[in-house]
């Protein structure tokens, strides 16, 4: 007897704009004093539209795109805070370390989840968002942002580091960077963003290129 085929997976319906979220975004743009609170409230309402079946970056971008027209009138700051808060909701269980004011009034490092960081100060929230983006490889895409300014001509008598010198200096410090608790996760996240994966090999591999000429 032929085995019955499993039913094909049904794609989740595309989300639609929620009027209440758009209203909160516009209120945030009009009320500077309560902007952060309104952005957090809007992000919490929109979090239900996040599709866990999508990659993290696409998951967030899909929801943000629904309110593009609202952000035009509300302003860039509102959009930035909304995206930050939504990102923390999208990666709710991601562990982060943030600086907060303890019971004695002094700054202390707290280890919390991304979901907890949504309810913290603006500074702590942004710090948590940065860690989430690095952990999930959803930082700024290559080529995005401002264009790098053309390098200024060196002053007379100043020695300029050549491309080979710069590469050699980076290569000499590669192992310390890879074993450093701060730099290692940043290197891993950047490699993932570029489509690579860092693994420890048993044997080295010879790669032909400019340096081998």
Image (cartoon, rainbow, N blue to C red):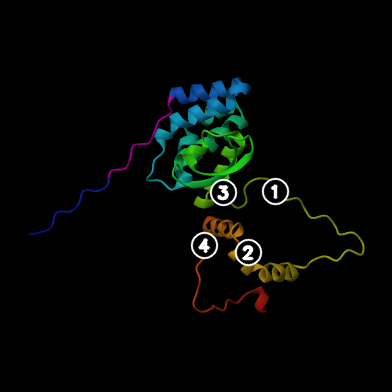
First along the sequence among labels 1 and 3? 3
Q: Which disc is residue 139 wearing? A: 3
Q: Which residues are magenta?
A: 10-18
Q: Residues within 10 Å of mark 3 (few under 14, many from 20)?
A: some
Q: Which disc is residue 196 wearing? A: 4
Q: CA separation, marks 3 and 2?
A: 20 Å
Quadrant housing the N terminus: bottom left
In the shown orientation, is residue 59 left or right of residue 103?
Answer: left
Q: Residue furthest right?
A: 156
Q: Which disc is residue 158 wearing? A: none
Tell me the residue at 66%/70% (across/down): 171
Q: Is residue 15 magenta?
A: yes
Secondary structure under tag 3 reads loop
Task: Give the residue number, with chain letter if any, for mark 1.
Answer: 147
Task: For marks 3 and 2, give the one nearer the viewer.
Answer: 2
Residue 209, compared with residue 179, is above or below; it is below
Q: Is residue 98 magenta?
A: no
Tell me the residue at 40%/30% (across/down): 16
The residue lying toward the viewer, choosing from 157 and 114, is 114
Task: Give the residue number, with chain letter if any, for mark 2.
Answer: 177
Inspect this view and state whether residue 137 appears. no
Residue 30 quadrant: top right
First along the sequence among labels 1 and 4? 1
Q: CA separation, marks 1 and 3?
A: 17 Å
In the shown orientation, is residue 132 left or right of residue 93?
Answer: right
First along the sequence among labels 1 and 2? 1
Residue 59 quadrant: top left
Residue 88: image location, x then y, percent:
49, 40
Q: Residues within 10 Å of mark 4 (few under 14, many from 20)?
A: few
């Amino acid at each position: 007897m032929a085995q019955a085929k499993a039913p094909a997976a049904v794609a989740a319906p595309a989300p639609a704009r929620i009027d209440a979220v758009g209203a909160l975004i516009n209120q945030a743009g009009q009320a500077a004093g309560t902007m952060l609170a309104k952005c957090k409230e809007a992000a919490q309402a929109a979090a239900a539209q996040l599709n866990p079946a999508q990659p993290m970056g696409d998951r967030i971008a899909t929801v943000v795109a629904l309110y593009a027209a609202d952000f035009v009138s509300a302003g860039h700051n509102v959009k930035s805070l909304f995206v930050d808060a939504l990102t923390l909701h999208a990666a709710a269980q991601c562990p982060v370390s943030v600086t907060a004011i303890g019971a004695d009034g002094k700054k202390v490092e707290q280890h919390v989840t991304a979901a907890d960081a949504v309810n913290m100060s603006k500074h702590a929230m942004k710090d948590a968002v940065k860690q989430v983006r690095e952990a999930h490889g959803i930082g700024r895409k290559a080529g995005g942002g401002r264009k790098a300014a053309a390098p200024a001509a060196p002053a007379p008598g100043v020695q300029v580091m050549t491309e080979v010198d710069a590469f050699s200096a980076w290569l000499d410090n590669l192992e310390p960077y890879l074993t450093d608790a701060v730099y290692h996760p940043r290197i891993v996240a950047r490699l993932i963003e570029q489509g690579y994966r860092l693994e420890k090999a048993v044997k080295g591999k010879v790669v032909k290129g400019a340096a081998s000429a």
